[in-house]
Structures are given as C-alpha cells and as structure tokens.
Amino acid sequence: MRTVFVSGCYDVLHAGHLQFFDEARSLGDHLTVCFASEASLWIHKARRPTLPDTHKQVLLESLRMVDRVVAGHGSRPGFDFENHFLRLRPDILAVTQDSAFKDEKRGLCASTGAQLVVLDKTPPRVSPISTTEIVRRARAPRVAPLRVDFAGGWLDVPRHAIPGEFVVNCTISPTVSLTDWPYKKRAGLGGSGAWALLNGLDGVAAEYELGVGWQDPAVIRETGCCVWESGPRPVLEFKRGSSFLRGCMAIAWTGGDHDTPGVANNPRDYAAIAASARLAREGVLRSDVSALAQGVEAYHRAQVNEGMQPLPAADTALAWKYCGGGHGGYALYLFAGSTQRDAWVQQDADARRAVEPYCEFS
C-alpha cells in the first residue's frame, strides 16, 4: 500500500482544499491529513481556529478521499505535523507549489526515505478563494457609509503622497448595502471602497488595482471625521466624533459621471492641495465648521485650476467643492447649520440631498 501525507491549517475548508486532497490521494492508496491544532495555530499564526479541533477532525474524516486525520501539535514553525510524519513514515509527502519550507520538508523526507511531491497548479474547479478571504466575507458588514472628502485628495495615492501632509474626510449617511444604494453610481463618494468592503474584499488592494489611493476604504472602515497622514498606506493621525457637522452638509449632482482612475494622472497643484488639507485639519481639530470650510474653499480653487468648471455658488453656503477626483459626480456644500442647508436642498430636491456625518461609535 502506497501512503500519502499532507498537512495544513485547513481552518475553513473550501473547494481548493478538496481539490488538493483529491490530487494528493491519486498519488497513492491511502491519504493522511494532518491539520494544525489550536495550540499550534496560537504558536505559528497568533490566532484561534474558526472551529474547535474536534469539529475540524470530524469534518475532515467525513471526506471520501481522506483515510486518516491527525492533529499536529509541533512547535517548530511550519512543522506541526513532524511527529506524526516520523511515526507514520508515509511514502509520499505532498505539498502545493506555494508551500513554505519546501527545502526543509525535502530534508525531512530524505531522513525517512519518503518522496516529496510538489503538485502542479491545476485549473481550479471553481474560482479560487483563501481562508483569509472567507473570514473577510464572514466579517463583511451588512451596510456601509460612503464618504465626503474635505481636502487633501490625491495625497492618498502612493505616487502622489507628500510626507508630512494630510488627507481629511468624513463618512456620511444614509448608508448603502448590496441591495440598497440610494446614491448615483460613479459619483465621487467612495462607492468602490464601500462595495469592496460589503463584498468582503481587501478595499485598499482593490483601490490600488484601480490605480488610485486608499482613503475611501480606510475612512469607510474607520468611520467618523478623520485626518490621515499622506503616505503609501493609511495611517490615522486623529479622529473626531462628527456631531459638529450635523445639519451642515449637502451634496449636489453635477450632471456627469465621475471617473477617478481616468483623471489620476492629470496635472494638478499638489502643494495647493496640501495647503488646503492643513486648513481643513485645523477645522477638524477645533471641531469648527467655519475653519473646515476654509480648507474646502481652498481645495475648490485647486480643482478649478486643474481645469474643472467652477461649481455654482450657493449664497447661504460656507464653501463647496467636487467630491473625490472631481470633473463630475457629486459636489459637497458646507453650511453653518441645518436651516440654511435644508432651505438650499429644497430649492432643487431632484439634484440636491442632505447628508449627515456617520460615526459608528458616536
């Protein structure tokens, strides 16, 4: 009888694991699966398993291609299975191409006369998914806020970042969900970041794939009124509860779609953008809408200098600017209070809407 041995965390079983077990079992007549025990996961990955060891063992034992299941308790990194391997002395140790410690595992096989077989990547039967992705999907929220950016936009894009400068933004309600999206699409409100979060994706990675920055998924996950450090990754400098903005914000549809990736490399004055963010940061620090409006106004000047059409003025508003990358989508209008805001919105309820700050723990 030709015996085969495989090992792994197998923390959340998915179709990729089953395909691997099938291919490993085809190498011989008997397959032993060793899963990392809870104690080993604590040592090697500093986390608990999603299932108790007893439940994981029963699940693995129920698989038709698996003949024996053991729990690994070894403390050597990547080798929690070693004691069982040396005791059982299988003919084959099967691993995937991306398996860690392949050279060390080859040495272990040599010590027992076993063969190390690296299974080729074969086309998956279903779209691949990792345990990390499954956990992220399970943790995905049912609803998420969108965001308005006050100043410092583009300084979250790694290639445009300026050390020592800032990005200032705030999450808003009403919230969105996979089935209820009460805003226009391609609107400059961070919708792609919210969509990624709702689908259990890595929002920052998804934005980088689009060629833009991290501010949308970062603030949508954080919530509140936030000041971030400009740089290649999101670093929160400070956060304020956003109650000082209640009744002060409205958005207006400009009549055209917004395309951040399409304008990401446009020439623009990043020094002026950074200066606007310093003003807005001071407004958030002081919880002062008028001071925040100075940063918003300065940013709108930078947008016009970039080539955007000046936004229609609102006599009762403190300041206004295009949301996101501009050149379309929604525009943010900032007011001193709800009386002025609501009256302005009611003048054109089809294109304008009131929004409120959203802070998960306020």
Image (cartoon, helix red, strand yellow):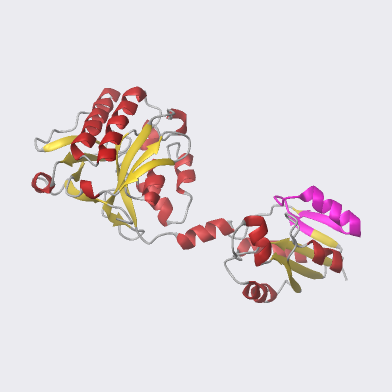
Which of 331/23 is in front?
A: 331
Q: In this view of the protein, can residue 296 be seen by the observer? A: yes
| Quadrant that contains the C terminus | bottom left
Which residue corresponds to the image point at 61% horizontal and 72% vertical from the top-left? 52
Q: Farthest residue in the front direction?
A: 286
Where residue 331 appears, as percent x and y from the top left, is 23, 39
Which residue corresponds to the image point at 27% horizontal and 23% vertical from the top-left? 305
Q: Is residue 19 above or below residue 311?
A: below
Q: In this view of the protein, can residue 255 be seen by the observer? A: no
Query: What are the residue bounds of the magenta stretch?
Result: 94-118
Tell me if 251 is positioned left or right of 216 in this view.
left
Tell me if 358 is positioned left or right of 160 in this view.
left
Where residue 172 appears, as percent x and y from the top left, is 27, 50
Where residue 203 appears, as percent x and y from the top left, is 45, 48
Q: Quadrant of residue 326?
A: top left
Residue 178 falls inside the magenta stretch: no
Q: Quadrant of residue 275?
A: top left
Q: What is the tally of numbered marks visible in this picture?
A: 0
Residue 115 falls inside the magenta stretch: yes
| Quadrant that contains the N terminus | bottom right
Q: Is residue 241 above or below residue 270?
A: below
Where residue 245 appears, as percent x and y from the top left, is 21, 46
Which of 299/262 is in front?
A: 299
Which residue corresponds to the image point at 46% horizontal and 29% vertical from the top-left? 159
Q: Is residue 278 above or below residue 81?
A: above
Which residue corresponds to the image point at 69% horizontal and 75% vertical from the top-left? 61
